Image (cartoon, coloured by chain):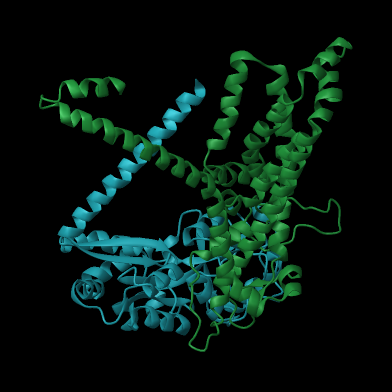
Amino acid sequence: MNRRVSGFLRLSAVVGSVVLIVGCGGAKEEAKEKKLVISNSGSDTMVNLAQMWAEEYEKVEPGVSVEVGGGGSGVGIRDLMQGLVSVANASRKMKDSEREQAKRNTGKEPVECIVGYDAMAIYAHKDNPVTELSIEDLAAIYGEGGAVDKWSQIGVDMSSIGGQDEIVRVSRQNSSGTYFFFREHVLNKKDYKLGSRDMSGSKDVVELVGKTPGAIGYSGMGYKTDAVKFVKIAPKRGETAHEPSLANVVAGKYSLARPLHMYTLGRPEGHVKAYMDWILSPAGQKIVEEAGYVPVAAADGK
Amino acid sequence: MSNTQDESPKGSTENAAPPGHQVGSVGRICRALSERTVTALIFLCGVSAIIFVFSIFYFVFREGYPFIRDSLDLKGFFLSEEWYPTSETNKRYGILALLAGSASVTLVATLVAGPFGLGCAIFISQFCDGKFRETLKILVELLAAIPSVVWGFIGLAVMNPLIIRFAEVPIGLCVLNAGVIVGLMCVPITVSIAEDAIRAVPDTYLEAAEAMGATRWQTIHRVILPAAKSGLLAAVLLGVARAVGETMAVLMCTGHTINIPFDGRLPFLHVFESVRTLTATIAAELGEVPRLDPLPDGNYPVEARHWQVLFVLGIVLFAITFLINLIADLIVKGIRKKA
């Protein structure tokens, strides 16, 4: 009896999902006939921003539908290489090997467009007494062969929040754009120390740091929550440290500012060009600021 | 059918009759055809498992092969913990820490799933009956229906703060957390196989034990457990195979850290350390790695190795689970022969 009931349930689940899939397919096709679709995917740092752009653009241009996918800079670049998306979002630059593969696959050269800036923020737990670090400190904490494993080694007394002296390093998976940027600009292209917690998303880093008093992590400045705080960054030991903020990025004072890219295959044309132009227009750039990042014009006009 | 045939000559003058006759012969052909189709379909379903296994293995091997051919250094691969597949200065592909991570989580999971699963199977088969037993069985099966990401969430949201609080460690994503979660995930499979093994113990044994005046505990301890020994071992092993292959929950609960939790100091396995497993590494990295074709000169660009080495990890994983399943299978076969 039980067997029969569960068999029936299983059957109805299968039938149900088939109907659902068919239904969705139908709806999508219908939408495609009516609307032009711009698909983009990529950077985890930029996914919220891309989503906000997409929603706003559909109000401006109801005839165009923008589909946004995340996954990471690598995913966007791979999708672009295979011609699966019109635009790839990336928080890192495309590598030469990837450019060549894209050319071989699609016959078109990827074209880069900088759509905003991010200050890669160093996060610590909100109760952590640490206020500022230098790039050298960060390299000693994160880099292979770096000597710093304990908060006390960099003069931070953790006794007030439970006394866990070990620095819990939170990092990203080794194919992420943010991981590449940190390695290039903090570790000077050298490797990371083994033993960091490698999270798969920008948000996961901030969440884990927020739950772990002894943790330190790096992620996009747009992901700040109340459970964490920004650590001010000094370019060198002894120099003035600055917080990741719009003003500091614009003034060129923050050391870990990085461009956010969008890549297209060949120069954008038609409705994709219209979308990219809109993103770079004041209306599109206002959204960059709303998402917690720095507009291009502000940063270039420094 | 015969009825239609009998009637058809009689009614041949009527309009409806010739189609009726036709339906009869067409029906016969249809039936023969459909019988053959169904047989063919069932055969196809039967061999599909074989086809799938081999095509999966072929695909995984094809993607990983260029790495094995060109840049596999066995010693560096298996005996180094330095996993730097995307390094700009010195790419290294050491999987020792990943193997140790998988082994440690599996070990703890077995220690959880073994006693729990076997105990549960003994309880279900020996100590309860009727409605209670059916309900319990359904509930255990329900445990298997909980998606792995939900287990992972429990590890992240419930176990993590508990471990931080009671073990006074800086972070609760560790071997213990993942091991307990995966162990609980393996309980249903262990229970159902162990229960089968216990039920396969011949009634004559039990009757003999009862006739000797053995108590219930003596029967279980001295008769059932020894008789079902190899089946129970197989149950635990198949649970282990599941633990090795578990991905999502492990990715969320281990802390995903390249670290070897074993060393020479007591208690040899340090359960409060974070680790990273083979499966989680593939899951976390494969998504963003580009698959690059060979250059015109036939060699692969060095960035192509990362994609390939992740497939080699897949082959290693495949080999491990295959070995465990094979051992479990041989053990089960062993019982059948004896019986």
Q: Position of residue B186 (x, y in %)?
A: 64, 40
Q: Which residue occupies the extreme front position in the image?
A: B9
User: Does the image show residue A221?
Assistant: yes
The picture quadrant where one finds residue A166 is: bottom right
Can residue A112 be seen at all in this image of the molecule? no
Left or right, A201 with reference to A279: right
**On-image quarter of the N terminus of chain B:** top left
Tell me the residue at 32%/64% (across/down): A50
Specify whether A212 is left or right of B203: left
Residue drawn 64% across the image and 77% down it: B69
Residue visible at 77% across and 22% down in the picture? B202
On the image, the x and y values in percent for residue A57 come to 21, 63
Q: Nearer the viewer, residue A172 or A213?
A: A172
B212, above or below B236, in the image: above
| Residue at the bottom extreme of this rendering | B297
Give the colour chain B carries in the figure.
Answer: green
In the rendered image, residue A15, in percent from the top left (x then y), is placed at 35, 37
Q: How many marks?
A: 0
Relative vertical location of residue B38 with respect to residue B106 in this rendering, above or below = above
Q: Position of residue A236 (x, y in %)?
A: 57, 82
Q: Quadrant of the C terminus of chain B?
A: top right
Give the color of chain A as drawn: cyan
